[in-house]
Image (cartoon, helix red, strand yellow):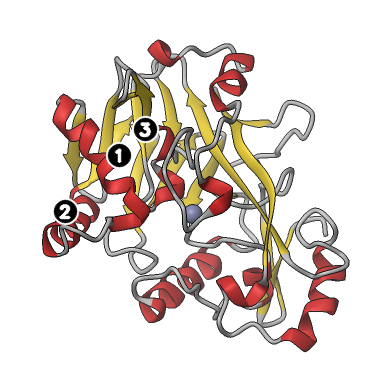
Amino acid sequence: MTKAVTWDAKTDSCDVGSTSIRRVVDLESLPFAANMIYPDAVPSELQELSSRFGAQHFDQNSFDLLLSFHAFLVRNGKHTILVDLCCGNDKDRPTRPAWHMRNGPFLDNLAKAGVQPTDIDFVMCTHLHADHVGWNTQLIDGAWVPTFPKAQYLFAEKEFTHWQREHEKNPPEPVLYGSYLDSVLPVIDSGQAQLVKSNHQVDNGIHMEAAYGHTPGNVIIHVEDTDGHAILCGDAIHHPIQLAHPEWSTNFCTDPVQSRETRMAFLNDYADTQTAILPAHFQAPDYGRIEQDGKSYRLAGH
Ligand SMILES: [Zn+2]
């Protein structure tokens, strides 16, 4: 029988059988007004939701939502994989001040996990939004080059093709705040990108699954072992507030209706199971099981 995968707050990691998953932080506790992310958020409800989910996920005075931007490092003895590459350094994002011209310690945090950029053999992005591709590249001598020189970067073909078309439609308009040009295209140009089907299997027990809606080619990533199951679910769910309100899609979803259907089916499938849910923006240490709570859901143990 599958065992529950439990997140160890001390090591910021969990084990799925013999595969380890560790969080590598780029940015944490970034505040966002609830309405800035969720158009359906009701201001009068925020105080209650804020005390329900606690100071880890909500500023207790302003009731702003707090989000983390981290990658997950997946190691199974054979492969060293990074999933969702956050915001990056030196990226020109004038309309996104928190992501603009950063000088953050992401690579130091990776080194603390005992991993050098040359150790990474696969990079995977659940989708190509600017906060999931940033560390794909770094600025060296004025040029954007892949940060992980030996890695194959796996992009879902459906996702890549969508943004490529958007880019070709509006050449003067920077697509994805400029990240298509500085964090995706250089990887294609270097020959390190592989365009894959939405259900691509990377290795035994590590595979992608379509979870369309947040973006047209959005995927989630399963890590499975006879002993356990975790899902790196990217932005299928952004913040615990969507456990209380699974029907709320974000302002950043390309298809809010499809995004809602995908999220509600996902939560319904995995609530009250042993599967650990590891979203791309939940604050530590709330990665783990979810439970049904009437018509909505809660983090197990809360
Ligand atoms: Zn995101």
Q: Are marks 3 and 1 in contact (CB under 8 Å)?
A: no
Give the residue at mark 1.
182
Element on which disc 1 rests: helix
Q: Quadrant of the N terminus?
A: top right
Q: Which residue is nearer to you in this view: 266 or 17?
A: 266
Q: Looking at the image, is 12 positioned above or below residue 215?
A: above
Q: From the viewer's perspective, is 45 left or right of 89?
A: right
- Residue 122 in the image: state x and y as whole percent: 34, 26
In this view, the mark in front (2 or 1):
1
Which numbered disc flags the more N-terminal residue, 2 or 3?
3
Q: Looking at the image, is 236 positioned above or below residue 27?
A: below
Residue at image point 70% right, 38% down: 7
Element on which disc 3 rests: helix
On the question of residue 279 being in view, the answer is no
Instruction: Identify the amino acid type marked 1.
Output: Asp
Q: Is mark 2 within 8 Å of ligand 1?
A: no
Give the residue at mark 3.
136
Q: Which residue is nearer to you in this view: 58 or 204?
A: 58
Task: Sort mark 3 into few (<14), some (14-19) or many (20+) by Cα contacts within 10 Å.
Answer: many
Task: Sort mark 1 into few (<14), some (14-19) or many (20+) by Cα contacts within 10 Å.
Answer: many
Q: Count the numbered circles shown.
A: 3
Task: Sort mark 2 into few (<14), some (14-19) or many (20+) by Cα contacts within 10 Å.
Answer: some
Q: Residue 88 bears which disc, if any?
A: none
- Residue 250 in the image: state x and y as whole percent: 50, 72
Q: Looking at the image, is 13 positioned above or below residue 92?
A: above
Q: From the viewer's perspective, is 205 left or right of 269?
A: left
Give the residue at mark 2.
164
Element on which disc 2 rests: helix
Q: Is mark 3 within 8 Å of ligand 1?
A: no
Label 3, label 1: how far apart the Cα atoms are: 9 Å
Residue at image point 61% right, 17% down: 113
Q: From the viewer's perspective, is 119 left or right of 149?
A: right
